Image (cartoon, helix red, strand yellow):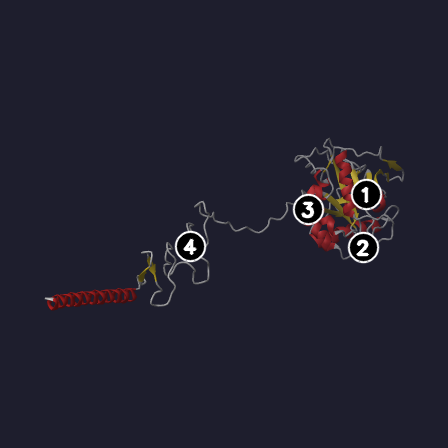
Amino acid sequence: MLAAGAAIAVHVTLVALLALAASGCAGSAGSAGSAAGGAASGDAAPVTRSTEGGRQATAPAHGRAAPPPGHRAEVPGRGVGAAGRSAAPPGSRADVSGRPADPSGRADPPRRHAGPPRAPARAPAYRRWGLAGPLVPAPEKPDRPSVPRAVRPGLAPVVERVATRDKVVFLTFDDGAEKDPGFVRMVRELRLPVSLFLTDSVVGPGYGHLARLREVGATVQNHTLDHTALRGLPYAGQRAEICGQQDKLKQRFGIRPTLFRPPYGVYDTTTLRAAADCGIAAVVLWRASMSADGIRPTATATASGAATAAAGDRLRPGDIVHAHAHARGSGRPGGATLTRVTAGLLRRIQEQGLTVGRLEDYL
């Protein structure tokens, strides 16, 4: 009886041991299968059970560290770019270039390429020449007097002032010695009508400069070949001086002038006859003289030799102004360029409510 009970107990013990061994083998096989499957697929790392009953991931088979709990795994091709750019922070939108966009979700506005810097606006021409305002244009239809009449037939008439109701004066320049390059620019920018009475021996090689003045609107007239005082000379000598310069100007500019100014403003009846014979329509003198010192009335000599003085020191409509300057480097203190003298004259003309007309439009 005792022997039978002992045999039963041994049998039960063997059965329990066999069952325990079978369950352990099955668990080991399952764990090995799971590890093998995970390594093959690369989807998950092996899991072990902690003493607290939780699950803990172990290192993957290829040796990379597992991400911490709750972290989203990095997707291949995202995150750090091929050029080393850092990934956009979590929750932000990144544009195609990898730059983080505005946190508010608005796209950056496109940037316009800045054009070349604009040059500062140029001051009006009249300001560059020191004038308070632009020159008022002369009337399109000038109030022209009747053709001046000579004292006797066959003599050229003498004009000191134009009898007109237009508020204009006339600027005339003699000789052609002044080669101020700024004067060409002034005449062009202000559209300044001026008349140039030229002497061939004084102009010398400066006809190219005078041609530029003609291109911007100046007119060319006669002032003899050699700037000789004509009064008292015989007819042949006076005719040679006047007609000789007519031929020179025809050769240089293709025109024969119609106006003549005798050197120093002196003349006689022989001068007027020689001028008419050379095709001159009028002998032009002046009523005011303008220099760096300002405007002053001028006494002019008549055919009889008597001097007549211009009245007053103010310009009047129709006055012919003789402008001249002393060139820099002439050795005279206070010498001024033609441009400076003309700018001062224009200011005085504007202050007196006048403007500049073209002498040839009135004679």
Q: Which residue is mark 2?
A: 201
278 w.r.t. 296: above or below: below
Q: Nearer the viewer, mark 1 or mark 3?
A: 3
Q: Is residue 156 visible?
A: no
Tell me the quarter of the picture where residue 299 sits.
Answer: top right
What kind of element bears circle 3? helix
Tell me the quarter of the picture where residue 10 sits.
Answer: bottom left
Q: Nearer the viewer, mark 2 or mark 3?
A: 3
- The amino acid beneath tag 4 is Val
Q: Which residue is mark 3?
A: 188
- The amino acid beneath tag 1 is Leu
Labels 2 and 4: the sequence-earlier one: 4
Dot 1 crowding, Cα within 10 Å, few <14, some 14–19, many 20+: many
313 w.r.t. 231: above or below: above
Residue shown at 35%/68% (left/top)? 62
Tell me the quarter of the picture where residue 356 sits.
Answer: top right
